[in-house]
Amino acid sequence: MTAQETTPHKLHVAIIMDGNGRWAAARGQPRTLGHRAGIEAVRRTMEAARSLPISHLTLYSFSAENWRRPLTEIRELMGLLRFYLRSELATFHKEGVRIKVIGDRKPLPNDIVEMITHAEELTQDNKALTLTLALSYGGRQEITAAARGLAKAVESGALRADAIDEHVFQSFLYTGGMPDPDLVIRTSGEKRISNFLLWQSAYAEFVFLDVLWPDFSGEHLAAALDEFHRRERRYGDTVAKR
């Protein structure tokens, strides 16, 4: 049976898209070619997600640590982001995809911040699928920012310290209001989460694939969902939950 046939509800799938550089190196090409091929993998993944039981798709697109990369590579990545937002936005809106961006926007170029704001406002009422791009994102940075926000709220008297629980804390995260990921996929064969959705992934299932991101396909996504449904999720209990 396929993942679509066995799923009782739609899922939040998060993906650590890794392997662009190695894909290019294996072909004797510059890393920029790998990033461009990675854009095509994003398109394939989006197309597949719309036909699978997925309500939220979150893509780790550019980490807070990626700002340490060579300036030429950062410029290429920002250029690809501009191209992607311009070329895909109309199609996403027509197909009912909601766009969200999480992360620290301060280091991003002003025109990209404006494009992000426009995309979020244009698609905010769409319901078919929520696509979240994690840009200039780091899990530790997110948790630190949330703690800082909570401290300011307590200091100003807007929030009592004894009122802070998991739900209140979560509302101060970039992902406030979003469901936690059910499944986190990482490509390239690496088996680590690289500072991605640290709080939110507490009870997520993880699937690590030996495929490099530019080679990722809808078949890989469907297979990962099938693997997810073969597992039992207990959340610390003795009875499996779905």
Image (cartoon, rainbow, N blue to C red):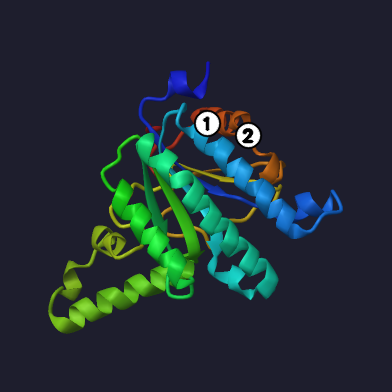
How far is the residue under mark 2 from the one under mark 1?
Answer: 8 Å
Q: Name the residue under label 2.
A: 217
Question: In the image, is 178 to the left or to the right of 1?
Answer: left
Looking at the image, residue 117 lies above or below residue 64: above
Q: Residue at x 50, y 47 (%)?
A: 87
Q: Mark 1 points at which residue?
A: 48
Looking at the image, residue 56 lies above or below residue 30: above
Front in this rendered view, residue 52 or 95: 95
Q: Can residue 202 be seen in this view?
A: no
What type is the residue that disc 2 sits on? Ser
- Judged from this view, the residue extending furthest toward the right is 28
**Mark 1: few, some, or many residues within 10 Å (few <14, many ≥20)?**
some
Front in this rendered view, residue 230 or 46: 46
Question: In the image, is 223 to the left or to the right of 235?
Answer: right
**Does the residue at mark 2 contact the one at mark 1 (Cβ under 8 Å)?**
yes
- Whole-percent x and y of residue 134? 47, 58
Query: Residue 217 appears in which quarter of the rendering?
Result: top right
